[in-house]
Image (spheres, rainbow, N blue to C red):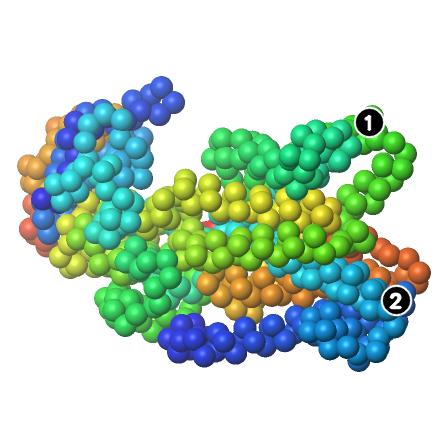
Amino acid sequence: MRGAALSSSGWLPCVAAALASLALLCLAVALAMTVGEMHIPLQVALQALGNALFDLGYAVNPIQQGVLVDYRLSRALFAACCGGALAVCGVILQALLRNPLAEPYLLGISAGASTGAVAVMVLGLGGAAVGVSGGALLGAVMALVTVAFLAIGDGGTSERVILSGVAAAQIFNAATATIVTTFASAEQARGVMFWLLGSLGGVRWPDVWLATPVTLAGFAVCLTHARTLDAFTFGEDAAAALGVSVSRVRLVLFGTTAAMTAVMVSIAGAVGFVGLLIPHTVRLVVGPRHSRLLPAALVTGAVFLVLADILSRVLIARQVVPIGVVTALFGAPAFALILTRARRPA
Amino acid sequence: MTLAARDLRWEAGGRIIVDGVTLEAAPGRMLGLVGPNGSGKSSLLRLLCGLRKVRSGVVSLGGTNIGALSRQAVARRLAVVEQHAGTQSQVTVEDVVRLGRSPHRSALAPWSEVDEAAVAGALERVGLDARRDQPWETLSGGERQRAQIARALAQEPSELVLDEPTNHLDVRHQLDALTLVRGLGVTSIVALHDLNLAALFCDEIAVLAEGRLVRSGTPEAVLNPEMIAEVFGVCAEVRVSALSGRPHIEYRPN
């Protein structure tokens, strides 16, 4: 019933679902703009938004206007991109590796990206030509290659992939720690450590202009592969037998995943568990087909991280809990739950 | 012209797995592939499906070298049913059978009536139309096998390759599965362990031993005590079954 109804009746439910989720996302962003050390009523937030977008000329306190548009709006929009992108990455990795526990953080991709970013930030490797995001991308790709080398070399069972991810995360975290303790000044070290836990505090508009196109383009690439990802249900050979060029698809999608993760990590640090929590939750609602799973994960991930960011600001008065801590708070129990429920393929 | 191999050779880990095999599936008939464990049946099937790269020799599908065809072109006419198809994904029977349509659809093409008809037809032919929405994880071994065959049928193949489709099935489901495949009228290559099942269903049988094709021909010509002693190392008697009119093998414990 569920499958037949949605598959055959065309685009109307899709448009309705898209509009509803967009409205939900806007609501979350609006909420994020009102919450903070300075409480600003929703009405003022909307007026400030009107001023910024359409130059409507509402009388808004310039400090409030600045806080709302330059800090909170950019931060909320980036949180949305970051959550959406990480959730989509989780879906892709789980499908390609056929592993319910696969996600960028647990596979060490985030750790690799952190190492790359820190190498650029602290050591100045590559300088302006590479940039922090470029360094993160290089690190993410290196981590992926490490995991692939450790895991796929010998059959690549489910457990092996995760263990390889743990190993890669350890290697790259050690590298990051070495760089920070050896080469960073005390002030640099403090900044880096806070950033490593996942922090949206430093997000400004240029970050949004980088994260948005990367998220949307990455999502588009993944969505065009939705049916291909379905074909991986019974493994790589089964996918190949269904007409999928497995190595090409793997290259494209792993590359996309690495790029999305790297950009998010370079801006916000390693935010974990979003790629685990969101895909599994969404799957319970929309089922396993990727043409629905991917958009649903994008929107849900976006809303989730915006809300998580709000929580990180109100959890302890006058203090901001790192966003990575908040996502782990929800994600780690989910990880345990999935682990106990994961059944072996019969 | 269907699926054929000429002088096929393949090695893995420094060991020769498939050693100079030449065979051809006759159109619309069922070719059985038998041989002891480790004789290279599964590897040969993978090569025939184009799932492994041929290093020496040629596999041709419809007269064209399979290596020159795109994966999609191969999947449009050749369907594969694997030995152990397993997944942790919470898919339904319908989801599985729909996969069979993927080689026929472009990346963004919507689900069409042709696709729907192919899926419905495939489900009906394997007798799973009433279980369309049933989750994969709740299916029995025989039902999973039938779901996979339905998925292969949704591909609308002219050639069908099955790797031990009767594994882990009880007697009735073994007979059902092979009766089903035989009734499809497509060219099929089936790896089988049970020589009696091969005798009962196959039009031709190819015997593999240590990667080499040692016999091929009709069940009557191939299944004899000498071959069984030589290839399997087992004493056996072969007589014509009064029930089926086919060769029937009785084994004597060593």
Please determine if labels 1 and 2 lie on a single subunit: yes
Quadrant of the rendered structure where residue B198 is?
A: top left
- Which amino acid lies under the numbered mark 1 shown in the image of this protein? Phe
Residue toward you, B75 or B220: B75
Residue denoted by label 2: A63
Residue occupying image coordinates x 32% and y 58%: B106
Q: Nearer the viewer, mark 1 or mark 2?
A: 2
B180 left or right of A113?
left
- Residue B40 found in image quarter: top left
**Separation (CA) of disc 1 from disc 2:** 38 Å
Q: Residue A287: x and y, percent? A: 50, 66
User: What SS does tag 2 mark?
Assistant: helix
Of the numbered discs in the image, which one, if any, rests on residue B204? Answer: none
Residue B252, image x and y in percent? 22, 34
Q: Is residue A152 left or right of residue B204?
A: right
Secondary structure of the residue carrying tag 1 is: helix
Q: In this rendering, is residue A198 above or below B134?
A: above
From the image, tell me which residue sits under label 1. A183
Residue found 62% across the figure and 57% down from its top: A212
**Residue B238 in view:** no
Q: Callout 2, which amino acid?
A: Ile
Chain for mark 2?
A
Which chain contains the residue that carries disc 1? A
Q: How many numbered marks are there?
A: 2
Residue at (31% x, 39% y) in the render: B51
